Image (cartoon, rainbow, N blue to C red):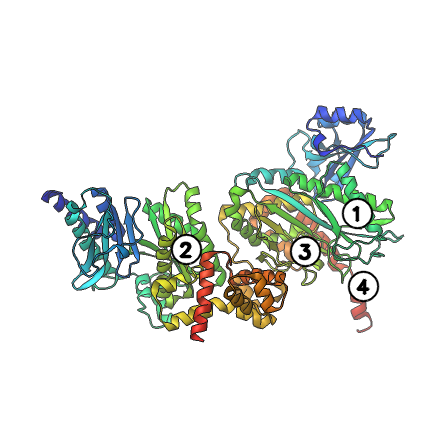
């Protein structure tokens, strides 16, 4: 780029940011102007945005020579890419990486300018820039309110009917007409009583779906799983990736949001685009992503094993023991049956029951990892 | 002597019907149709009038039939469906007799909106956009009792069998086999049959097919079963709950979803659950139906779905292709209207993207009120009167019936409920006569 072109490029970035465009829009502009693939990740290596190009890695974490360096640097293993840190002051907010062009070094200035613009946006989103009036939903996820009544009153003053519970859904869309996409999403997530909320956050559209009853949450999960197909049926040429958090009380919306964003990150890394992942169905992956402390691990193990334990207690069965034994003997049904002193058909029957009660498939590697992790953590923390 | 008319040789046109009738020397043809309540009616014509009948020139007095009671609908026209031409299995070489199922048309030949069979055809047509390739199978339960000389029939049976039992001494087993043989002779395919829970209770299952053929098959079964049973000193009844402390007789309606629509199965389940209370008025259309819908004998009572629970309203086993089993209907109603409203509910689920919540694990009878609230589970109506109120409030189910049938059905059922409400039942005598 010439000096004049760089100035025009910087002005475009400013215009996009002033118009409310976030990291995704800024990365998209860089990709469009330079015909490269652009990947933006936050400091915890969570996916923030991707634009242009194909064949990009899901993360550059393992491809860095020096994560501490803010320099524009090459990637390891001969990967055709460059990366630059997104920083504001001394705070490292993430990384912007570019891929695909034959002479990527000539794009250093454009990449740095884009990283700077994204840094401003990320700092603003994290509340580092005072003076900007935050929406009700931003305040709610920032845990500004001390009690539900205060939240409900403030919501009512803004003509928002706040539900008692919500489920957060984070969605990224490629090639989307923003308005049509938002309309389709609003239609898909009708939820229960109360108003839905929206946030643009780190390049994703976040929807807070009212879920006063558990059925509203389960329908939100089902609607999310069907969203890609329904968008296609509406002839919306858009490819989505998303995550759905758990049902929480309105004041705890931050937790559901964090879960939705974690589910989105895991979804992109495990499956690529075109799917929506449900946090509750990701088993041990959120724990692996966050590297949780011992309390989080214990909670995870309890949560996964709780349905089996409740069933065993109510029906005087030994499904949990059967599962542990099944894993400990290398999934050998014959040996497990001998150890349990039952017929092997009984073991098969119990394994089917376990799958139904836990809502998982014992022959699915992801589900099996979750159960094995829960059993291992339970043994370590008991 | 049986004069078989296999499924593969079903007539498809007026000319084929005339040729078959001539080949078999048919002497009489019964032109069958149903009233709004699902009761089979027929007009018998000599074979010499068959061609005129097939040209839609046979009329009947519509004013005397339930649900057709508007003055201007006298002299309705019967429009036979050639594909339903079948010889009755009890025909003799001397007097072969056949039947044709008919739609009812206006004197000017236009469709009559009070015709249940036409209503189902319309529902099938309307559902084409949202339920492409859906197939229906029916599981029909009924009792065979000993025929005694009593005013209202009997509930006596020497049978002591239960689910899937075989008893060599049971006349019911023989009668059921004869019913199946008769159906097949008439070109109605049967998938299987077996003894059911109750002593004297049986089940006949039809394979998946188009909804109109399924309703025709049930209508045929009801008349054949009564005829075959009577010839054996038995009485067949599709009454939903003939004996208080025995299993009731249901009609499980099984929808097989096409592979293309598999992802939309949840919407279809959502449609059935959302409209279940109003569907009940049509699919459980007698006051007796509600004595079956109690928390016993695996009868459904809540609007809940499950993959395995035997007493859920909707059961969707983990099978490919997906099959959605609606378990509340009974076979005493009008099969054409039942299938029409069920298709309407399924289609509405797909169009409106109605979702059903998570499937239930375990028995629905164990559900506490709070859990039902959290899961969004409703209760099926407990009486015909409640069900009619639900029907009044459900525009989707009403639209599936059409205005004419909705009003005719509603008036007839309200009158039936009122007669029942005013009657003094034996239970009341037992409970109150000496007590007060």
Q: Find numbered disc 2 in the image and state the secondary structure of the residue it sits on.
A: strand
Q: Disc 3 or disc 1, which is closer to the eye?
A: 1
Quickly name the residue at label 2. Answer: A277
Q: Do the residues labelled 3 and 1 touch (CB within 8 Å)?
A: no
Q: Distance between the residues labelled 3 and 4?
A: 20 Å
Image mark for residue B176: 1
Q: Mark 2 lies on which chain?
A: A
Quickly name the residue at label 3. Answer: B384
Q: Which chain carries label 3?
A: B
Q: Distance between the residues labelled 1 and 2?
A: 51 Å
Quickly name the residue at label 4. Answer: B426
Q: Are marks 1 and 2 in contact (CB under 8 Å)?
A: no
Query: Foreground: B165 or A257?
Result: B165
Q: Find numbered disc 3 in the image and state the secondary structure of the residue it sits on.
A: helix
Query: Foreground: A130 or A71?
Result: A71
Q: Disc 2 or disc 3, which is closer to the eye?
A: 2
Q: Disc 4 or disc 2, which is closer to the eye?
A: 2
Label 3 and label 4 in one chain: yes
Sequence-earlier tag: 3 or 1: 1
Sequence-earlier tag: 4 or 1: 1
Query: Foreground: A184 or B49?
Result: A184
Q: Disc 4 or disc 1, which is closer to the eye?
A: 1
Label 3 and label 1 in one chain: yes
Query: Foreground: A149 or B424?
Result: A149
């Amino acid at each position: 780029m010439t000096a004049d072109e760089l100035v025009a490029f910087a002005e475009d970035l400013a215009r996009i940011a002033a118009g409310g465009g976030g990291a995704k829009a800024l990365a998209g502009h860089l990709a469009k102007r330079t015909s490269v693939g652009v990947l933006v990740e936050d400091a915890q290596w969570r996916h923030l945005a991707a634009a242009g190009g194909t064949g990009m890695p899901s993360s550059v974490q393992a491809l860095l020579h020096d994560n501490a360096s803010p320099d524009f640097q090459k990637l390891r293993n001969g990967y055709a890419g460059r990366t630059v840190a997104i920083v504001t002051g001394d705070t490292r907010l993430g990384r912007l990486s570019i891929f695909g062009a034959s002479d990527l070094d000539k794009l250093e200035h454009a990449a740095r300018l884009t990283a700077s613009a994204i840094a401003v946006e990320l700092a603003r989103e994290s509340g580092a820039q005072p003076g900007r009036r935050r929406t009700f939903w931003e305040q709610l996820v920032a845990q500004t309110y001390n009690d539900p009544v205060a939240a409900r009153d403030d919501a009512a003053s803004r003509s928002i009917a706040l539900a008692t519970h919500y489920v957060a859904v984070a969605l990224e869309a490629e090639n989307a007409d923003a308005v049509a996409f938002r309309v389709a999403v609003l239609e898909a997530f009708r939820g229960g009583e109360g108003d839905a909320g929206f946030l643009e956050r780190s390049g994703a559209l976040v929807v807070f779906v009212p879920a006063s009853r558990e059925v509203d949450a389960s329908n939100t999960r089902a609607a999310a799983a069907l969203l890609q197909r329904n968008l296609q049926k509406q002839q919306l040429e858009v490819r989505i990736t998303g995550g759905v958090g758990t049902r929480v009380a309105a004041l705890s919306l931050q937790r559901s949001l964090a879960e939705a964003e974690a589910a989105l990150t895991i979804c992109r890394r495990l499956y690529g685009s075109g799917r929506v992942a449900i946090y509750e169905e990701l088993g041990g992956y959120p724990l692996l992503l966050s590297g949780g402390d011992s309390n989080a691990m214990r909670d995870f193990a309890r949560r996964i094993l709780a349905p089996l334990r409740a069933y065993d207690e109510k029906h005087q069965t030994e499904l949990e023991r059967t599962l542990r034994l099944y894993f400990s003997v290398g999934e050998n049904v014959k040996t497990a049956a001998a150890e349990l002193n039952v017929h092997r058909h009984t073991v098969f029957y119990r394994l089917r029951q376990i799958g139904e009660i836990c809502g998982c498939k014992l022959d699915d590697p992801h589900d099996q990892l979750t159960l094995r992790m829960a059993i291992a953590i339970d043994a370590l923390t008991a | 002597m049986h004069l078989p008319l296999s499924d593969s040789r079903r007539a498809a046109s007026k000319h084929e019907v005339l040729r078959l009738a001539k080949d078999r020397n048919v002497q009489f043809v019964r032109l069958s149709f149903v009233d709004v309540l699902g009761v089979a009616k027929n007009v018998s014509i000599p074979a010499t009038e068959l061609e005129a009948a097939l040209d839609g020139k046979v009329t009947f007095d519509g004013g005397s039939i339930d649900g057709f009671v508007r003055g201007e609908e006298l002299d309705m026209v019967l429009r036979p469906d050639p594909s339903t031409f079948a010889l009755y299995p009890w025909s003799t070489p001397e007097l072969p007799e056949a039947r044709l199922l008919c739609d009812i048309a206006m004197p000017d030949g236009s469709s009559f909106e009070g015709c249940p069979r036409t209503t189902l055809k319309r529902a099938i047509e309307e559902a084409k956009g949202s339920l492409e390739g859906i197939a229906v199978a029916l599981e029909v339960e009924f009792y065979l009792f000993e025929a005694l000389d009593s005013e209202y029939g009997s509930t006596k049976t020497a049978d002591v069998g239960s689910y899937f039992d075989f008893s060599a001494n049971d006349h019911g087993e023989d009668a059921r086999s004869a019913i199946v043989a008769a159906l097949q002779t008439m070109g109605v395919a049967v998938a299987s049959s077996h003894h059911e829970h109750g002593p004297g209770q049986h089940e006949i299952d039809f394979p998946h097919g188009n909804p109109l053929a399924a309703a025709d098959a049930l209508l045929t079964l009801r008349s054949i079963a009564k005829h075959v049973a009577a010839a054996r000193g038995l009485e067949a009844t599709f009454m939903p709950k003939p004996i208080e402390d025995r299993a009731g007789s249901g009609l499980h309606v099984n929808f097989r979803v096409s592979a293309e629509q598999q992802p939309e199965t949840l919407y279809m389940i959502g449609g059935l659950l959302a409209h279940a209370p109003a569907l009940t008025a049509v699919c459980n259309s007698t006051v007796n139906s509600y004595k079956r819908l109690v928390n016993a004998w695996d009868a459904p009572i809540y609007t809940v779905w499950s993959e395995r629970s035997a007493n859920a309203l909707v059961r969707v086993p983990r099978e490919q292709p997906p099959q959605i089993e609606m378990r509340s209907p009974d076979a005493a109603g009008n099969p054409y209207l039942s299938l029409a409203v069920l298709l309407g509910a399924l289609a509405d689920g797909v169009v409106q993207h109605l979702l059903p919540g998570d499937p239930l694990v375990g028995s629905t009878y164990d559900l506490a009120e709070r859990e039902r609230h959290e899961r969004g589970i409703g209760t099926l109506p407990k009486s015909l009167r409640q069900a009619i109120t639900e029907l009044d409030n459900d525009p989707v189910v009403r639209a599936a019936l059409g205005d004419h049938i909705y009003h005719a059905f509603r008036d007839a059922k309200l009158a039936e409920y009122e007669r029942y409400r005013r009657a003094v039942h034996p239970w009341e005598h037992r409970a109150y006569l000496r007590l007060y």
